[in-house]
Image: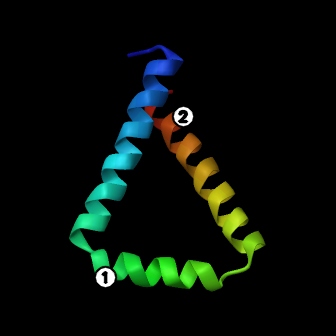
Amino acid sequence: MDEPGTILWAALGLAIAIEGILYSLFPDAMKRMMAHVQTMPSGAIRGAGLAAAVAGVFILWLGLG
């Protein structure tokens, strides 16, 4: 499990599983969140996505380092 490709696939699978759990447990809240995101400026969405990506890589680095 030390190969970078294996770790990347494991992280991607975990992210998809967590997102699926959120949609199945809280469908109405996820609908509201998506409607709210559509009203946000693109720059804010881009910034939030970049911050989430950096945080995810940092968490992987902490967990595996």
Please say if 45 is above or below 1: below
Left or right: 56 as drawn, with respect to 46 = left
Where is mark 2, residue-wise? Answer: 61
Q: Quadrant of residue 45?
A: bottom right
Q: CA distance from mark 2 to mark 1?
A: 33 Å
Q: Secondary structure at mark 2?
A: helix
Q: Label 2 sits on what residue type?
A: Trp
Instruction: Pick whichever of labels 2 and 1 is earlier in the sequence.
Output: 1
Q: Secondary structure at mark 1?
A: helix
Instruction: Name the front one of labels 2 and 1.
Output: 1
Q: Where residue 10 sits in the image (x, y, percent)?
A: 39, 31
Q: Where residue 12 sits in the image (x, y, percent)?
A: 44, 38
Left or right: 38 as drawn, with respect to 32 = right
Please say if 28 is above or below 56: below
What numbered label is drawn on residue 14? none
Please say if 65 is above or below 2: below
Residue at the left extreme, as displayed: 25
Residue found at x 37% / y 38%:
13
Residue found at x 43% / y 84%:
32
Residue found at x 31% / y 48%:
17
Q: Where residue 49 sits in the image (x, y, percent)?
A: 63, 59
Please say if 59 is above or below 63: below
Instruction: Please tell me how crowded label 1 is: few (under 14), some (14-19), or many (20+) other residues with Cα within 10 Å.
Output: few
Q: Label 1 sits on what residue type?
A: Asp
Where is mark 1, residue-wise? Answer: 28
Residue toward you, 3 or 43: 43
Q: Quadrant of the N terminus?
A: top left
Report the number of discs: 2
Decide: marks 2, 1 in contact (CB < 8 A)? no
Instruction: Please tell me how crowded label 2 is: few (under 14), some (14-19), or many (20+) other residues with Cα within 10 Å.
Output: few
Residue found at x 72% / y 73%:
44
